Image (cartoon, grey):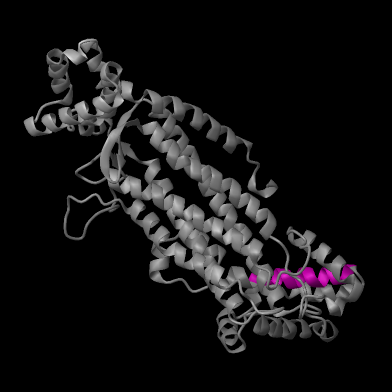
Amino acid sequence: MAVSLFDTLLSTPDMIAAFDDAALVQAMLDFEAALAAAQADEGLLPRAAADSIRAACSAGRFDIPALVAAGRRSGTLAVPLVKELTRLVAAGDSDASTLVHWGSTSQDVQDSAMVLVTRRALRLLDDGLAALCGRLLRLGEDHLATPVLARTLLQPAQVTGFGFKVAGWLAPLVRGRARLRDAAAAALQLQLGGAVGTLAVMGERGPAVVARMAQALDLKAPAATWHTQRDEWVRLGLEVALLTGSLGKIAADLALMAQGEVGELAEPSGGGRGGSSAMPHKRNPVSSMIALAAATRTPQHAAALLAGMGQQHERGLGNWQAELAEWPTLFLSAHGALSALDEAFAGLTVDTARMRANIDALHGLVAAEALSIWVAGAIGRPAAHAAVEAMTQAAVAQGRHLRDVAQDAVASDPALGTLDAAQLDALFDPVAATAPAQRLARRRLAELRADLAALPSFENA
């Protein structure tokens, strides 16, 4: 698979290698070797022929650029690959060469090969998720009592705990990791049906060949051929897209909190990371940039998978081929975003003093709801809402802290005389304001830690 310069910038070498041309060709050859061995086990071809075919199934013996060029003319890489494999087998065993790819079809080998390389790609995603989830767990637990502004509609709203915010980032990743495993369990299955999905050439031995091949390739044996029934396969791709969207949300928050005017978080810097070609002072959030770019381009690729599901009759024309082309890009984007954010959180700077300063700069306005509830104890909720709204307007107009305005109101308004003015300071304490978030985050992080610990290794999932 040819990868553009900009795809390379937004992905990782490991994921690019998982889907490169050599990996796909070798996976196709692994299918052909397993097919011949399974057919020999079932007495459909001589063992010697299967051995000759298997001996030729090494990608290093093939001119891969020539295969790709020939594939453009035939409409599939499988046709020139089988032709060249047949030639290589014939050089040592002419009888065996007549049995290469026997009873199979182009889509069988290409679908199964994509399943095999996708399994490797999913291991990379799972490993990356394990690392990033671990970092976020520790970050959230370390900052349960750290006050930070919660923002709604991009405006300051109330004080929350930074640990609570981190738990919100983490939860979709934990769910996504589990869902990816569920989707993989259904989708990582052998494709073998022959020309129209009936295994006609292999007769009654066909199902047994399927079972033997699936075992040899460590894939699920399908209940039936899925040449044009792509639901389980597409669901897996959509889970990868959802994961990338969740990573994009984290990147968006991280980038906003790293803005110079906010300054609450900062990605690691140094060694040319995040620099500007024109402005030496810049500390650009490049990890967030990569993850946001990946999340921005992913919906189009996911939509293409869905658009291709209306495959005609027993074998599709054009839509299956479009799906093959779109599929790797989903994984390239997901792993690029995942690796970028893992690097960011590995060296993240959390400026708790700046978080507190940003709260203090609002002169108590973010405690207005707590103040309203306190005032409602004396005059009821509707009147309290109106009273506190007037206090906030006065605080803004006079450039005063809302606590001071409230103190004056309590002292001068007989209706508020039942309130204990000594309680006002507690209403405006940012650390005390994190108490509800702390309770929820402590419980949620413990649940997420347990969920992660309960996941088996990917190989056993």
In the rendered structure, the answer to whether residue 272 lies left or right of residue 61 reads left
- What segment carries the magenta color? 26-41
Question: How many numbered marks are there?
Answer: 0
> Residue 49 placed where, x, y %?
85, 77
Relative horizontal placement of residue 213, taking residue 244 as reference (left or right): right
| Residue 222 position within the rendered picture, expressed as x and y whole percent measured from the top left | 76, 63
Q: Is residue 274 visible?
A: yes
Residue 28 belongs to the span the image colors magenta: yes
Relative depth, front residue between 136 and 412? 412
| Main secondary structure type of the part rendered in magenta | helix
Please say if 412 is above or below 136. above
Is residue 3 highlighted in magenta?
no
Q: Is residue 269 left or right of residue 69?
A: left
Is 379 drawn above or below residue 118 in the view shown? above
The quadrant in which residue 37 appears is bottom right
Q: Which residue is found at the position 82% from the left and 83% from the top?
A: 93
Instruction: Please give the name of the residue rendered at 25% of the width and 13% of the height, measured from the top-left corner.
Output: 423
Toward the viewer: 135 or 312? 312
In the displayed structure, does residue 48 sit left or right of residue 22? right
Residue at image point 50% right, 67% down: 303
* Residue 451: percent from left, percent from top: 59, 36
Residue 410 or 50: which is nearer the viewer?
410
